[in-house]
Image: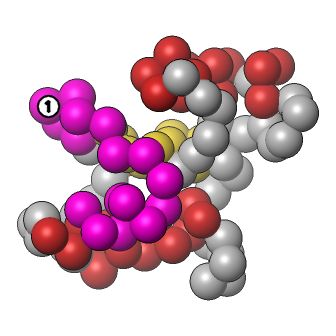
Amino acid sequence: MKLYVCYGTVGDRHHACGRAHKALKAAGHEPEVVRTYGCYGTDRFFKGRCAVKKMTGNYKVPTLVLDDETIVDESQKIADWAAANPA
């Protein structure tokens, strides 16, 4: 599985990418972390964010791509998925 994030996975409880990563790790998953960089207004200039848009229709991260190519978008949905699907 791949977890697409902005710049990383370290952050306080308010950082969406960090929350998603923490939830996956707590459930026993070891996602491949893909840093997409970019931020509001500049996303279209970053290759990683463009890849996310091709998959989801938007530039927003975090985005989880499962091994079967299922996409789980948004930190709370990723956390909910992780809780329901422990490793």
The percent coordinates of residue 40 (x first, y second) are 84, 41
Identify which residue is drawn at 69% across, 51% down: 7
From what the image shows, is residue 20 above or below residue 74? below
From what the image shows, is residue 76 above or below residue 50? below
Quarter occupied by residue 50: top right
| Position of residue 9 in the picture relative to residue 77 (left or right) | right
Viewport quadrant of the C terminus: bottom left
Q: Secondary structure at mark 1?
A: loop
Q: Is residue 70 magenta?
A: yes
The percent coordinates of residue 75 (x first, y second) are 48, 61
Q: Residue furthest right?
A: 41
Identify which residue is drawn at 29% across, 69% down: 80
Is residue 69 in sight in this rendering? Answer: yes
From which residue to which does the magenta span run?
66-81
Identify which residue is drawn at 22% across, 28% down: 69
From what the image shows, is residue 49 above or below residue 23? above
